[in-house]
Image (cartoon, rainbow, N blue to C red):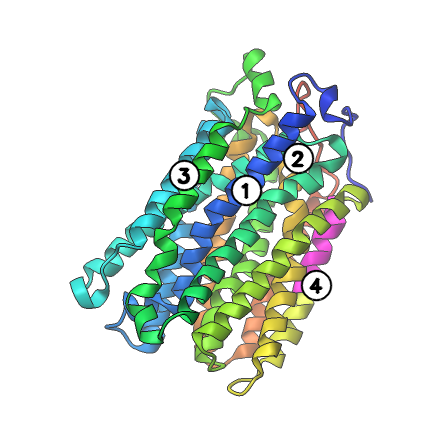
Amino acid sequence: MTERTSAAPGAPGDVPGRSRADSRKASRAAFVGTLLEYYDFSLYASAASVVFASVFFSGSSPFLGTLQAVGTFAVGFLVRPLGGVILGSLGDRLGRKKILVFTLILMGVATLLVGFLPSYAQIGWLAPALLVFLRILQGIGASGEYGGAALVAVEFAPEKKKGLMGSLPGMGAALGGVLGTLSLLVVSAMMSQEAFLSWGWRIPFLCSVGILAYGLWLRRSLPETPAFREIEENKTVSKSPLLDVIRQQPRALLTVLVMTIGQTGIGYFYIVFMGTFGTNQLGYGGTEVLVGLIAAQLANGILIPFFGSLSDRVGRAPVIMFGFLYSAVFAWIGISLLSGIGTPPLLFWAVMALGNGVGVAAIFGPMGAYVIELFHTKHAYSGLGLGREAGNALGAAFVPMIAVALAFDDTTVWLSLLICIVSLLGFAATFLSRNRPAVATPGDDRVPASV
């Protein structure tokens, strides 16, 4: 069955206020801005896997220190629903551009300050406490980033390229993760392990000041989307977009939440948990683990636009459902191949690339346009903020922590079952909503997914 779409004009110039130049500028800003912001966010994820347990939780056992380090990563996701609700509501009332500038500032400053934090050996419990606080700021900043960038890209996109354009923020997030992880790998390769853990890991965090400056320059020149300008001119901007989306489109919210649990749960299983698994269960050094993380994120970033473009031709739901089914099957194959100490690093890298690169990319690529098409323009940012960030909190925060507990009990069969469950949940949510998306353009009203 195919997804229904509105009979909207097919070229950017067909809609007043949407030129081809603006469309290109918006897609570039959505991609580059998200790449820069997720450099910061993913840099923290990589450092949590290979650095923070020894730097900020050195007073704990190896197991507890690892769990605490991954836990600080999870904190950033637990606050994201609150940030998504606030920033999403503001984005629907004040415009997409202003919120995207704010999220970049918040993320950049928090990341820079992580680079200045003293270690546990220097100030004791205050070190992890400050780390958690800065992680909370990062989480709030990230909560408004993806939704806003996806809205900008899709609302400026030509009708037949919404899947491709909507995939660019996801591609930016993945490649930003590559840059963050690669920066740690390069720094660690240039010095001894002792120097790296003492001060070298801070260099990539401090470099975020340059990234912040460039990102601000780019986003300040970003035009407001024609969709938002249209509802402003028609004086139909919602005064309570969050309440509106809860009352009018609860089914769409639930769909986005469950799909996001699946997508982020699988993705961060590879990006966060598998880093600690490679170190503690497979005996790899920091360099081997970082190469695996780079392979996972690079494959993901390269394939996301492919699957996004494919969804413009065959439909979004079929591509997303393939990604969830692939992830469920591959979990049993990939994890069983990683048998323990002595497993060749090349096999670990291949599992990371195929798991995060094919499965998650097939889900994430079309998902940007798919979930936006579920909501009315006037409360789309709020719908994404609440639905997606609540799903992030459940999927990205808890799945890696559950996996850590299961792996340390040496019951790796449960790891496969865990990924299988979250994959099938995402598949079910996509299947049940597959005929409901209705593409919107400026001047028309989106069909509620709850109807």
- Image mark for residue 32: 1
Counting from the top left corner in percent of width and height, residue 342 is at 54, 87
Residue labelled with disc 3: 213
Residues at marks 4 and 3, CA–CA distance in whole angstroms:
40 Å
Residue name at image x 67 percent, y 23 percent? 19
Residues drawn in magenta: 316-327
Q: In which quarter of the image is the C terminus?
A: top right
Q: Earlier in the sequence, mark 4 or mark 3?
A: 3
Q: Earlier in the sequence, mark 2 or mark 4?
A: 4
Q: Which amino acid does label 4 sit on?
A: Tyr
* Nearer mark to the viewer, of 4 and 3: 3
Whether residue 243 is visible here, answered yes or no, is no
Residue labelled with disc 4: 326
Residues at marks 2 and 4, CA–CA distance in whole angstroms:
24 Å
Residue name at image x 47 percent, y 29 percent? 220
Residues at marks 3 and 2, CA–CA distance in whole angstroms:
33 Å
The answer to if 390 sits in the magenta stretch is: no
